[in-house]
Image (spheres, helix red, strand yellow):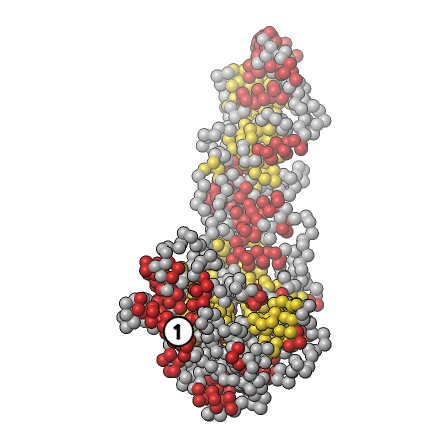
Amino acid sequence: ESKHFSTLGGMPVTGWLRGTVKAVPSGDTVLIVANAGPTSAGPPPEKIVTLAGIIAPRMGRRDGSYADEPFAFQSREALRRALIGEPVTFKVESEYASREFALVFKDGVGDIAVEHCKNGWCVGKPSREDENDENAMKRNQLIKEAEEDAKQFFRGKHTCDPLLLNKAVRNKSDPRLVDEFIDAKGAEPIHCVVEVALNGSTMKVSVCEEGPARGAEVTILLAGVVAPAMGKKNEKEPEPHAREAKYFAELSVLNRDVRVVFVGKDKYGNRFASVLPKDDHSSIVPLANALVERGLAKVSDYSAALALGGAGPLRTAEAIAKTNRIRIWHNYVPPSNEDSHFENMGRSRKIQGKVIEVVSGDSVIIEDSQTGEEMKVMLSSVRAPRIAPLGRGARERSVKDEPYAREAKEFVRTRVIGKKVEINFEYTKTIAGNDARDIPEKIIEFATIALIGEVVKKPPQYNNHGIPIEAEPEDAPNLAELLVIRGLASVVRHRENEARSYKYDDLLVAESKAIQQKKGVHSPKDAPIPHDLNDASENVKKATQFLPFLQRAGKFHGVVEHCINGHRFRVSSQNAGAVFTLSLSGVRCPTRDEPFAKEALNYVRNRVNQREVQVAANSVDKTGTFRGTLECNTLTLDLASELVRAGLARVSFHGDANALEVEKAAKIARVGIWKDWDEEAEEARRLAEEMKANNLGGFNEDQNPARFYGSKLHDEENNNNSNNNNDNGLHSPGGSGKVNGPPGYEGGVMNKNGNTSPGGYLSSVNSSASSTAAAPVVRKDDQQIQQQQSTRNQYDNRRGSSSSAYPQARDSGPPVYTTRLGVTETLREGKFFAQILERSVANELWQLVQKEYANDDPDVKAPPPGFEPKVNDLIAIKSLEDNRWYRATVNFRDENAKELDVMCIDFGHNERTSIRHARPLHSSVSLNSYPPQARLCQLAHIAMPSRHSDYKDFAESEFQRLVHGGEFHAVVDARMKKFDFDHAWSSAVDARPELTLTIWPVEDDEEEASNNKKDSKLAKPYSPEQFLPERSIQGILAASGLCRMSRFKVGYTKTSEDNREAIQGEVDRARRDHCGMFEYGDVDSDWER
């Protein structure tokens, strides 16, 4: 009679019992477990029995002390495949030496011993007690006949096949070959058999696939879970539910064929793997998932992400088990909710913002896109190496940065500074305050930061059975994951109930990859030693020593480490090897409690803080702060100009002409600090400051102080001023304000041959003038005015009538301001040097140069000892043309003739002079005090004829006649942010221009009307009705057929686009009328720029 056995202690020795084969240790031994499920007392009873009447080859020991007998493994495998997991009926016949011998029957098969012997995997071994038992004698006879039958047909161990005989004993596998075999398989499942279950999540498997690893036993840990420990033998009791977990694992996979996917290793070399059923189409979930669902294991943070199919299914199963409080979760208490903090702050847990500062590798400051609120956010579940605190105390304690701290911060800075990100707040931590030291309580917010606008491709995913599934949509990169995968941060190991990042499993995967590849903090090598930069602004002496090095470097690369206020910054430069304080030269922002101080600071923080910039240092102040310029690719202009344009800075007296131009536009727009601007009061204050700063003396009511800015004076005023000059005979150069040229400038009148007068802007008419008697500046003479008016009349006649209406003006988009300039020198291909007349200091500078060198006569006095000017040096020269002093740069030195080829940087003309007529440039008129006044410009939208064209000389001559010495309104179409002054001075024709302009001549009525207006040289709004592109210099040249459209498009504003279209129309009209270079038709196919 069959019945379920309940307890091993009360089970009778005789009697038929029912059970399920749980394991097959050898070819004649099986482990049978009762069919009853686990009870509150633990797993159901089980019994290990030996098949009575037979003996199979003996299996070797795992420790190698005893080897397998031939065909022992094959015999065990045959019995395992026949019985594992099958229900059987058995009866214990006898017991000897703690071993129980039993008859085992399988439904539909019969006596297992007879069947096993018939297959040739064992031999009969009758017991002496069987001699008195008739049934036993009959059974022994059946076993003997089965054995003879197997021998007759060479089955099993009785085979004569040499190949099978060679494989009769398992060969011991080389551990190195086993590792190589498993590593080569990657994520491909490997056919294995589970030999031993040490606990619910740790087991030993033997490899069954052909290869060097066949038969090798490998210890594996189930990826993603950890089951309660069984405890060491005879030392401590197992953890709660440990036996149940082990029983479930044994019942599920012990001695069964499974597919094992090896997914990684721990630091001790133990392998993580996912165990799957052998059948690909089985509905059984992986063993790890089944354990978690039943509350027999916890999700392991260390290996959860390595589990096949990801950690998501495991987390879901664990959440269900926690909710239902199953087994190990029967005392589970959910963590407290963090929503209350964010509700009190009135903030959503998911926001978007911009990173404005990087504090460390795991801490950033975010500006909320909606509210503009700034908040400090820590990255969830990661820890980056710490940066040593600043301050004297830290230096005295020799506190240093942790390894890779700077690398982590630099990576975060380059990756997210100034970019839009998405912040998912997840939890907070409270730092207790100190009432005695008046330190308040602090709450730190932790969040996951995703980079908006970037995507990361996810690795292929597999289902529970190892079959690839469709990839999930690409997601935005997680900043913490990017840090961890590069070894620049480590993942925090949270306690069981602690809140954590919702991307925690991805962080663990990234960390495992970094550990495997030995990156960053996981590298066994010593961390790179950080290069400490010198603090060049530590004191004035040190700053003064550093200044020549920074000046020679010109513009060099740096990073803004901190914004002190709107115009002061801490800048570090690896190229210069220093960290220093930089103040923008020429401008000053409001500071401290002044109005708009906070706006100015926020402006620079949002644009240059921790950005890569180009810095040029010009001088040092008395506090050790460097003065210079700062440019960034986030800005259209340099930072000083941008601040001025936004109305957040004032231009100082020594400010750049461009900055003065921009400041005027900001004042007109009434932005920032200029919202209550009083033009008259501001003008009086500025002029008084400038006169006092340059020690030029005061002025009375009859004098016009605006003449120092190039304002025009009446001829009568010019004569009066020439008689009222100082005793040394100095006269203001360019009293007319036309070109700001020195005495003798006549505007480059064209001669009969169409060429300019010798000497460029230095007219030869006054070459014989006395060095002490300065001739008044001559405005555009009648001949030149008539020639230019004649050209305009011809243009009007070609259009039908000089009084005909011009085309209707087009909408030019946002307001555009014109610039007033005077041309001092013309070059080829539409290039020229010009001075900006708005707020110009060229007159004042020229007068100051004459004053500095008034007592230095080169004909009497030699240059100072040791003065040897070299190429690119800035010097002062006395011109042989008018006996006046000019600032110049050396382009070439003739050692034989002792002469220099120089270019005057304030007017753009070239001269050749003797070294005796050169002097070192005084500091009061250096570039630090006054920038070059001559600006290299080029006409926008058009291209002059090439050197192969018959009209080249005529076009260049007409261009010089129209432009040279004239005063113009200009619209800046393009400005070079990184203009190379040295290249422009040495080779102006080949250099790229600083300004690309569209220019209109100043009409005669404008000249007369501007004589009595002190702001005539200031920027005025661009009006399409007043500044028709067809009346520009480009339009005049295009209508005459002396140019064509340039292939290079400049200017992207609506105004530039409209002007280009209008000039294109003039070129097309000249082409149709066969004017100029189009006399014989279109030249586009024969001439290319």
Q: Secondary structure at mark 1?
A: helix
Image point 60% across, 53% down: which residue?
Answer: 488
Image point 51% across, 77% down: which residue?
Answer: 763
Would residue 717 be found to the left or right of residue 14 on screen?
left
Q: Quadrant of residue 382?
A: bottom right
Q: Find residue 974 and report its horizontal and vertical position in percent.
A: 45, 65
- Does 778 sit above or below residue 602? below
Q: Find residue 471 and report its horizontal and vertical position in percent.
A: 45, 41
Quadrant of image for the C terminus: bottom left
Q: Find residue 773 and report its horizontal and vertical position in percent.
A: 55, 86
Q: Find residue 397 and report its horizontal and vertical position in percent.
A: 70, 66
Q: Which residue is mark 1?
A: 787
- Does 250 sit above or below residue 416? above
Q: Quadrant of residue 941?
A: bottom left
Along the viewing direction, whichever of 705 and 494 lies nearer the viewer: 705
Instruction: Specify the amino acid type for callout 1.
Output: Gln
Q: Quadrant of residue 985?
A: bottom right
Along the viewing direction, whichever of 80 and 524 lies nearer the viewer: 524
Q: Does residue 372 show up?
A: no
Image point 67% across, 33% down: which residue?
Answer: 176
Along the viewing direction, whichever of 779 and 153 lies nearer the viewer: 779
Image point 62% across, 22% down: which residue?
Answer: 73
Q: Residues within 10 Å of mark 1 (few under 14, many from 20)?
A: some
- Does 738 sit above or below residue 199? below
- Does 683 sit above or below residue 116? below
Along the viewing direction, whichever of 278 and 123 lies nearer the viewer: 278
Q: Does residue 171 show up?
A: yes
